[in-house]
Amino acid sequence: MRVSRKSLLILLTVVMYISGEWSQAKSFNVKDFQAKGDGQTLDTSAIQRAIDACSHAGGGTVIIPAGEYLCGTLRLASRVTLQLEPGAVVRQSRRPEDHPRTRHLIVAQEAENVAIVGKGILRGIGDGDLGRRADRSDAQMPEFRAGLALFEKCRNVTVQGITCLLSDTWTLTFRFCENVTVEDVTIRNHYFHVNSDGIDPVSCKHVRIAGCRISAGDDCIVLKTVEGKSCEDIKVRDCELESIATAIKLGTESSGDFRDIEFADCVVRNSTVGIGIYVKDGGTVERIRFANISLENYTPTGASNVEGAIFPIFMDIEKRHSDSPLGHIRDVTLENITVTSGFGALVQGTPEHPIERLTIRNFTFQVRDPQDWGNRRKHIGGRRTLSGQRDTEFARLPGWLVAAHVRGFTLDGFTLILPPAVKEDPGRQPVILRDAPDSIIRNLIVEGQKNSP
């Protein structure tokens, strides 16, 4: 095909225009807007002026150089990237008046192409024990609590490279967002600090979370649905997680559906629940895959108030309130899962809404420091006003894997490794099924654990 000289000139002009526009992307250093970065001066207004200038210029990058910047709420806008340079710390103010109309350090609402990147730090106000100690010495809640970042009704969101420390409530919240990427982010919250979730996609679509390291005083990565809106196409991979609550969680907020979700190649350590699905508000959880995950439970010491409900894997359907609808769990696959725990796993539906088509393949359970769970209760995972016999009926059964009210359960490849010198596991069974028609169990092996050299 021949291209005329005129067409080539037009094409060259367009390319030069686009290149010129790209090269003119602007940077705005907060120091040029009188930010002090001395850890004492409230720098909210100065940094906000830089963000607003960037937005008015059509977008660009707001640079926060090394220093400690005391701030209240900052509001990001479309086409603005907030870049935290190495050595930069944005420290959240503890004063409610510095957070007008919100309880977050950074907020973006109805924005597109917005990002927080760099090697700097967002530091919250969640230092100290809160709501987790068994003796209730930390039970008094402060009047003002706040999280680090909220993105609401946003598209094309990126959070990359940053470190988040000591968030008081949810660290990174994405609510009704689409096309979200969270990559290479470190979150280190106080382990005994309630509500300090790591990453919370709430009724979001097309989310990618990769290479993150999270230690939290509540759930690490938790998907939720509210207002009947779904959570779809979520992929999580290569993350290291530690949680006094649930490391990998769907629910408990579940009025909308969850579908086409995958967690893969993750490591869970020192967590009360490794993988948890909690349906309380009538939503449907379907087409979910967990693959190549190593998980290790929290070992009880008497210090925490969660020790009566420890599970490596837990799934549950219930009503949050008497008038709540019952939800569904179906088409869930777990494969290449390795558990190290002294507590058994539990998956339970209801007689009316059993879990449907649950498949577990290549499941290795290494028993370490076996516990007595004769007084265990199911893990509630959130607020509710109902309780019943299912709180304990199956949670206390002496099986390393208990499945109750399940239709079409397949367990293909289960290796149970007992502690050294133990040839049998008196009083416990590898698998217990209750109301589980059409179940298939293949390749079940029980073996003693080999002593380390």
Image (cartoon, helix red, strand yellow):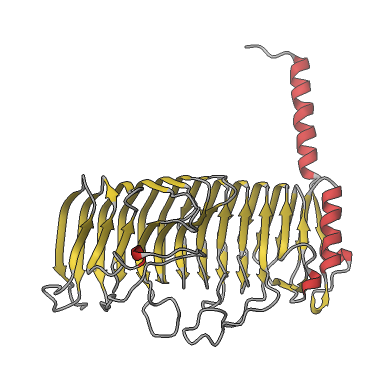
* Whole-percent x, y for residue 162 in the image: 62, 64
Residue at image position (44%, 50%) is 326
**From what the image shows, is residue 56 above or below residue 126?**
above
Instruction: Give whichever of 180, 411 is nearer the camera.
Output: 411
Badge count: 0
Task: Examine the rendering and report whether any part of residue 183 can be seen.
Answer: no
* Whole-percent x, y for residue 163 in the image: 61, 67
**From what the image shows, is residue 138 above or below residue 356?**
below
**Residue 271, located in which quarter of the rendered image?**
bottom left
Task: Examine the rendering and report whether any part of residue 380 can be seen.
Answer: yes
Relative to 130, 290 lies left or right: left
Residue at image position (48%, 53%) is 236
**From what the image shows, is residue 140 above or below residue 280?**
below
Relative to 425, 299 lies left or right: right
* Whole-percent x, y for residue 209 in the image: 53, 54
Outermost residue toward the front?
322
Relative to 125, 232 lies left or right: left
Outermost residue toward the left?
423
* Whole-percent x, y for residue 188 in the image: 56, 72
**From what the image shows, is residue 320 above or below residue 449?**
above
The C terminus: image quadrant: bottom left
Relative to 311, 99 lies left or right: right
Residue at image position (62%, 11%) is 1
